[in-house]
């Protein structure tokens, strides 16, 4: 964990906003950190909390005081991580027990009591309504950080009471430099991982550390090259094989998305140097001729829908069948 904002890659506007809010004493009671998994939400939420609780009271955390060290070690009594037992739901009980029943207790040592809720998009409607009661009249010392991959799942009443911090995609060059300079990744691999990560540093790091990235990439290209000729059973088997590589299915679907974005890009520009699956140029060109613009958009939409359904625990095979029916239909 880094000591201050200087080590953060990108997100300059968010960092500026945080520093100014602290400097001008205009810190809000609630923030939504909205962005893809791996975009840096947790890192910046932690650094924001460190700065607020830091004993030096500057606009950067000192990283050395007892408070900063406790937050780095995740054992500060006033920085509370909201957890949930059920894998895909934050229940009304989670909110009542961890937030509503404790928010009235003053901070033990710092000026603030900070609640950090990862995956806030998993809150049930009842959970959101329970949280809303606290957000409507929070104690002066309470601050809430809601981290979410999909802000649309939050009620408008919650969104209207929070400051929205949007985590945008980083430039490939920033990610590539980080991989080469900080992680000593060879340039050719940094190039590939940065391109596939689509502006997401966490994703790039995950790909660098994946022993099986090349095999997965090969599996995906093999599948998509021959998708029109394959039976649905073969398609499902191919996907099951790939998920044994410990790559999450949403990452696997992201790779498929990159393929169809390449097709769309080539169809629109006829420029090969911008596509990511460079060694698959022939297949990309052929499919760009085969698919209409509308069809490619349908496929990209179907991929997003599949990711949402899998997050909602819909049956894996059913989700994949629906997705690949869309891909295979002309």
Image (tube, rainbow, N blue to C red):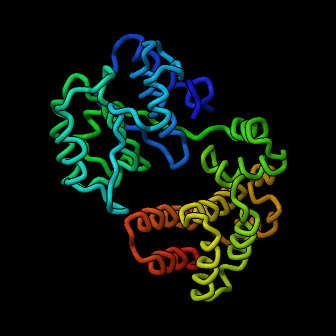
Where residue 238 appears, as percent x and y from the top left, is: 64, 80
Residue 35: horizontal and vertical position, in percent?
A: 48, 43
Which residue is at the far front? 66
Residue positioned 45% across, 80% down in the render: 318
Q: Please tell me in which quadrant of the rendered image residue 216 appears.
A: bottom right
Vertical side of 290 occupied by 62: above or below: above
- Name the residue rendered at 50%, 33% in the picture: 72
Figure quadrant of the N terminus: top right
Q: Quadrant of residue 145?
A: top left
Q: Is 256 placed above or below 55 here? A: below
Q: Nearer the viewer, residue 126 or 74?
A: 74
Identity of the residue drawn at 49% across and 67% down:
302
**Which residue is nearer to you in this view: 254 or 311?**
311
Residue 210 rendering spot, x and y as whole percentages: 69, 59
Residue 234 x, y percent position in the rendering: 63, 87
Residue 115 at least partly seen = yes
Asked whether, in this view, residue 176 is left or right of residue 115, the answer is right
User: Is residue 17 shown to the viewer in this render?
Assistant: no
Seen in the picture, residue 58 relative to 286 is either above or below; the reply is above
Please tell me whether residue 214 is drawn above or below residue 45 in the rendered image.
below
Give the quadrant of the C terminus: bottom right
Q: How many marks?
A: 0
Q: Quadrant of residue 89?
A: bottom left
Residue plotted at (45% across, 12% down): 56
């Amino acid at each position: 964990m880094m000591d201050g904002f200087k080590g953060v890659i990108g997100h300059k506007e968010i960092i500026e906003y945080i520093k100014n809010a602290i400097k001008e004493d205009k810190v809000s009671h609630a923030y939504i950190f909205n962005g893809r998994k791996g975009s840096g939400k947790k890192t910046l939420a932690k650094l924001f909390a460190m700065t607020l609780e830091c004993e030096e009271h500057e606009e950067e955390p000192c990283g050395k005081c007892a408070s900063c060290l406790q937050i780095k070690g995740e054992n500060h009594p006033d920085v509370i991580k909201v957890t949930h037992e059920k894998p895909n739901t934050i229940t009304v009980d989670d909110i009542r027990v961890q937030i509503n029943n404790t928010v009235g207790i003053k901070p033990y040592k710092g000026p603030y009591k900070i609640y950090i809720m990862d995956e806030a998009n998993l809150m049930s409607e009842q959970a959101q309504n329970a949280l809303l009661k606290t957000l409507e009249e929070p104690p002066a010392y309470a601050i809430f950080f809601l981290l979410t991959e999909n802000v649309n799942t939050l009620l408008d009443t919650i969104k209207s009471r929070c400051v929205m911090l949007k985590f945008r995609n980083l430039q490939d060059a920033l990610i590539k430099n980080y991989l080469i300079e900080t992680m000593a990744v060879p340039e050719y691999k940094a190039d590939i991982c940065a391109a596939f990560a689509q502006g997401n540093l966490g994703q790039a790091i995950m790909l660098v550390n994946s022993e099986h990235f090349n095999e997965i990439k090969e599996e995906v290209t093999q599948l998509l090259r021959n998708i029109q000729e394959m039976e649905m059973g073969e398609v499902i088997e191919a996907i099951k094989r790939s998920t044994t590589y410990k790559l999450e299915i949403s990452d696997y679907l992201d790779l498929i998305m990159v393929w169809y974005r390449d097709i769309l890009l080539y169809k629109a520009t006829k420029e090969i140097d911008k596509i990511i699956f460079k060694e698959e140029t022939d297949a990309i060109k052929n499919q760009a001729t085969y698919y209409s613009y509308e069809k490619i958009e349908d496929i990209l939409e179907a991929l997003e829908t599949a990711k949402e359904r899998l997050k909602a625990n819909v049956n894996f095979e059913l989700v994949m069948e629906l997705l690949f029916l869309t891909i295979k239909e002309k």
